[in-house]
Image (tube, rainbow, N blue to C red):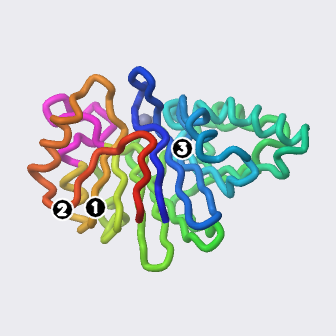
Amino acid sequence: MKLTVLGCYGPYPKARGACSGYLLENQDTKILIDCGNGVLSRLMEYCGNLSNIDAILISHLHPDHMSDLMVLRYAIAIGQMKGKVSKSIDLYTPASPKEDYDRIQYQQAFTMHTIQDGNEINVKGIKISFKRTDHPIECYAMAFEKENKKFVYSGDTKYHESLVEFAEQSDVFLCEGGILEKDWNENVPHVSVKQAAELALKAGVKRLLLTHFYPEVSTYQLFQEAREVFPYILELAEERKTYFI
Ligand SMILES: [Zn+2]
Ligand SMILES: [Zn+2]
């Protein structure tokens, strides 16, 4: 499998950046994970024909993870009308908040599926499982398994012990970690970068890829704080970079 970072900022991007969006590929399989603002433009660089997308998975319905769905649906529907897009795209998302969920569908752009805790699906041989996280709205971490390789994405979350087991022994753990410990308090619905590193260490992950950067925070400081805890392969997500799993 290979993972291309389309956007890595939250809850808003820095200049020329994009919010959460990742393209997971395996041979001719393409799965879009999250679709925050700025992601569609980047996706077009890697996937000219939207029919080539096998599934879209949305961790939760906060706008920095889903707002470009509202534009992507036009591209799909108009493509369908003109005969360029041959199908509705399978979209997996939490069913709440209901008013946000209800607004996503446009014509026949998507075939809607709802995610629930413990769900397991299979997209062209990639096994995908979901784990509810601790966030103000319904949000899911996702694990992707194919041929003894395991890739896990945290979604948005506070520190949660059950994520340790879920991320266990992953080859790559893409985890949010955009806030320094000094800026973190109990009311912040995210892990600090130190907590992300602790989670990864406990889970025995082989390679930690940090993402969801608050644009005002120094990425150098984020890396240093994680490095004090996590001694193995540690990287900060870079937009347009591809990581092999
Ligand atoms: Zn977010
Ligand atoms: Zn969120």
Camera-nearest residue between 141 and 98: 141
Q: Which residues are magenta?
A: 177-195
Q: Pointer 1: what residue?
A: 207
Q: Residue at x 76, y 46 (%)?
A: 110
State left or right for residue 58 relative to residue 173: right
Tally of numbered discs: 3
Calculate the distance from the C-alpha at mark 2 to the C-alpha at mark 3: 27 Å
The answer to whether the beta carbon of the residue marked 3 is less than 8 Å from any atom of ligand 1 is no
Is disc 3 placed on a helix, strand or loop?
A: strand
Q: Residue at x 90, y 38 (%)?
A: 82
Residue 134 position within the rendered picture, expressed as x and y whole percent measured from the top left: 38, 46
Residue 104 position within the rendered picture, expressed as x and y whole percent measured from the top left: 70, 35
Secondary structure mostly seen in magenta is loop
Residue 147 position within the rendered picture, expressed as x and y whole percent measured from the top left: 48, 79
Up the image or down, 37 lies above or below 26; here it is: above
Q: Looking at numbered disc 1 in the image, what kind of residue is underneath it?
A: Arg
- Outermost residue toward the bottom in this view: 148
Q: Quadrant of ligand 1?
A: top left
State left or right for residue 87 relative to residue 226: right
- Outermost residue toward the left in this view: 228
Q: Is residue 75 magenta?
A: no
Q: Which mark is residue 34?
A: 3
Q: Looking at numbered disc 3 in the image, what kind of residue is underneath it?
A: Asp
Q: Is residue 185 visible?
A: no
Q: Pointer 2: what residue?
A: 232
Q: Are dots 2 and 3 in contact, CB under 8 Å?
A: no
Calculate the distance from the C-alpha at mark 3 to the C-alpha at mark 1: 21 Å
Q: Residue at x 61, y 74 (%)?
A: 125
The earlier-in-sequence mark between 3 and 1 is 3
